[in-house]
Image: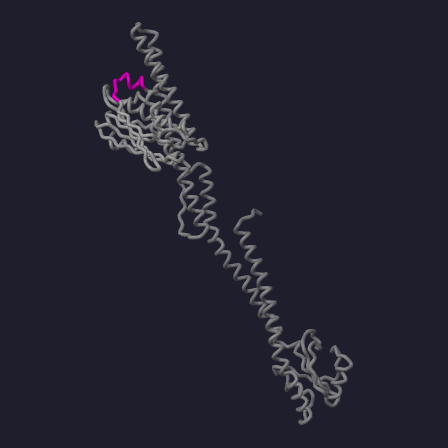
Amino acid sequence: MKRTIYKELILIFVGVLVFSNIITGYFVTQGFEYNTISDMKRHMISSVEEAREIYIEYDMSISEINYLFKDKTIPVKFINDLKGYDLTEAELLRINSGECILLEQGGKSKGFPVAMTMVEGIYIVSDIGGHSIFGSIRYIIMLNSTITIIFGSIIFLFVGKMAIKPIRELMSATRKVARGDFSVELEHNRKDELGELIDSFNKMTKELSSIEILRNDFVSDISHEFKTPITSIEGYTKLLSNCNDDERKEFIDIILRETKRLSTMATNILTINKLDYEDMNDVEEFKLDEQIRKSILLLENKWGSKDLDLDVDLDEVVIKGNKGLINQIWINLIDNAIKFSPIGGTISIELNNRKDTCEFIIKDQGPGIKGEDQIRVFDKFYKGDKSRNSEGTGLGLSIVKRIVDLHQGSIELDSNLNGGTKISIILNKSFS
């Protein structure tokens, strides 16, 4: 038989119910008998003495007197001997002398008191050990316990199913998630731990759904991005077999450019995947302004070939962070500004030192970015300028955003169509 939480709960409930009823019944019975017997002791002696007086004063037979006391609360009977009673010689002597005595546990039913005396050779005994009230109470308690267990178990069969229902729904939903269905969402109005578990499950499925969408988009995007240069390389390679020298030179330049684009894209993909699992243990202090100057000089051939004017104003800033990753920020942003700036244009680069932070600002005079495209410029493979699809990989700004996030910084973009682009980055000088 398969074990389930439902069956285990029923067994636990019935077990607890039986155990608690047995314990409760025992203590209730003992308490009732103790209190009742204590009260009866006070009346047993008087009942025995009353029966003796009736026997002496009235001309009644023993059977008549027994009948008279038959329905009394305190039972009294006349007997010829004391067989079955546990009496000492001293106690028997006192009784035979006509004294009325009370023995705590001298009755035929052990543990119960008995009162007795003797008159004219006849013993008058009040023994509550066999009193019907004790048997009735035990029977009532046992019957009540049995009914409680039966009805409690029946009720719990239905209540237990209601309590287990959310768990079964959660199990069913988990199986769907295991099969790849991340659209599952469980509704509930619970405020307990099970409600928190369901909320956590719903949050998990939403995260998995988002990851699945990103994965599918990533595969689709990367397939498209790689297909374009590969198709271009394949086409121009075929043309090389039937072209003149001038065309061959042009085709080879195109093939080299597309090959370089593929190489850059592969490098950027590896970089952004690495950043997704990057830890920030490798941090050090360094001069940020000096790093930015080196990045500008590294790209001198590019901005020099377009006769660009660079307006550079850098405050001295010492920052703590991952030096290699932060350097990629400046390389990507300056390279983008150069790429989209018109020949003879101006690029403005600023670094402002603040109390606990520093702000980097770069402005270009490029074509700008449409308003609807600005909210997606940091997405992987997104390129808003469709006319420039042959340039870039759409990963540069995504890499920049990820590095800034890793350093607990912020990045903002402000751009106007045909009015240039401004990007601002704020970094904490002391990264923790």
Q: Nearer the viewer, residue 374 or 159?
A: 374
Residue sitting at 27 percent across and 30 percent down? 422
The percent coordinates of residue 367 (x first, y second) are 23, 25
The percent coordinates of residue 397 (x first, y second) are 33, 28
Residue 302 lies within the magenta run: yes
Coloring scheme used: one colour
The percent coordinates of residue 53 (x first, y second) are 67, 91
Q: Quadrant of residue 14?
A: bottom right
Q: Nearer the viewer, residue 232 or 119?
A: 232
Q: Main secondary structure of the magenta part?
A: helix
Q: Quadrant of residue 262?
A: top left
Identify the magenta region. 300-309
Residue sitting at 45 percent across and 40 percent down? 176
Q: Quadrant of residue 267?
A: top left
Relative side of 418 to 2, left or right: left
Quadrant the C terminus occupies: top left
> Outermost residue, left direction?
418
Residue 160 lies within the magenta run: no
> Outermost residue, right direction?
89
